[in-house]
Amino acid sequence: MFNNRSLLIVGGLAAAAWLASNSLYVVDETERAIKLRFGNIVEKGIEPGLHFKVPITHTVRTFDTRVRTLDTEPSRYLTLEQKAVIVDSYVQWQVVNPTQYYEATGGDEMQAVRLIQPRVDESLRNEFGRLNLSQIISEKRDDLMTGPTQELDKLMRDELGVAILDIRVKRIDLPEDVSSAVYERMRSERERQAREWRAQGQEEAERIRANADRRREVLLAQARARAETLRGEGDAEAAEIYAQAYSKNEEFFSFWRSLGAYRESFKGGSDMMVLDPSSDFFQYLKSPTPHSSAE
């Protein structure tokens, strides 16, 4: 009796454990779930937490709602000028409607990728076909993906229950024949700009040089005029001083000037002068007071 009772208890506990493990399930924070009964959806959008289901009858499918990245293969597109570019891009997407996602893909992520990738390729092909090459290689090319991202997001929400969060271009390459033409055009454009800037610089240099020369001539003319004015004023003041000194003692002034003339005339040892000995030039050599002796 004791052994039978123990077996019943153990069996009951095992049955309870099996029932609990098959009746309770947990949806993680990064997941959303749907409940199926014999393959038909009976509960949608199950939030994270602990939930109950009927064993055998109910099946629960969970879906990861974290952001995923689809790295596409480089593709060749034609621009508005019918020039080829090779674009390497990636897409970030996320499951936002588990029910619709399950109905469209059966919950298979690879199936979702196979459905998303052609749509992305078509969207990029249409967008690059509306752009010229200069717009594509500009610094703001990431902004060009805003329109395709929004359009594809709306379409994928309706068809697959997934959100397209971002389409980002990693690299844009040009075929070799196109690259040569583009680089040659860029080189020609840069050379043209360099010639324009060089001509503008030379023109500006000539203008600055002409202004500097004109200002120099003006300053020199003003300086010469000022110098002549000062020299004239100095000469006038000197003449006035000489006149005042001469009027005070005419004999001394005459004597002083004669000494200066002697000094200038005889400062060179080999100098020769031919003069009349009775000339007034020698009056102070003959007598320190010539006028007195004359009287």
Image (spheres, grey):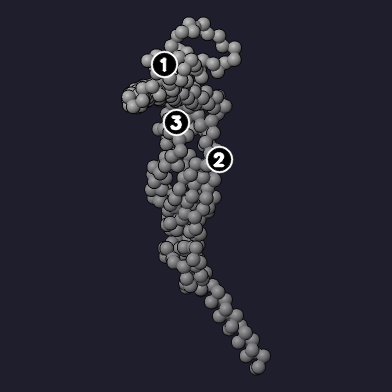
Q: Position of residue 276 (x, y in %)?
A: 48, 6
Label 3, label 1: how many angstroms apart (C-alpha)? 111 Å
Residue that numbered label 2 is attached to:
73
What's under tag 1, amino acid-wise?
Ser
- The residue nearer to you, when weighing 171 against 209, is 209
- State the count of labels: 3
> Residue type at mark 2?
Glu
The crowding category of the residue bearing disc 3, from other C-alpha atoms within 10 Å (few below 14, some 14 to 19, many at least 20), is few
Q: Is residue 277 left or right of residue 226?
A: right
Whichever of callouts 2 and 1 sits on the residue coming sooner in the sequence is: 2
Circle 1 crowding by C-alpha within 10 Å: few under 14, some 14–19, many from 20: few
Q: Which mark is residue 134?
A: 3
User: Is the residue 82 above or below the residue 10 in the image?
Assistant: above
Name the residue: 57% across, 76% down.
18
Left or right of 201: which side holds 72? Answer: right
For marks 2 and 3, the one nearer the N-term is 2
* Type of amino acid at the residue the image marks with label 3: Ser
Up-down relation of residue 167 to residue 181 (above or below): below
* Mark 3, secondary structure of its residue: helix
- How far across and how far down the image is residue 71, in percent? 54, 45
Q: Earlier in the sequence, mark 3 or mark 1?
A: 3
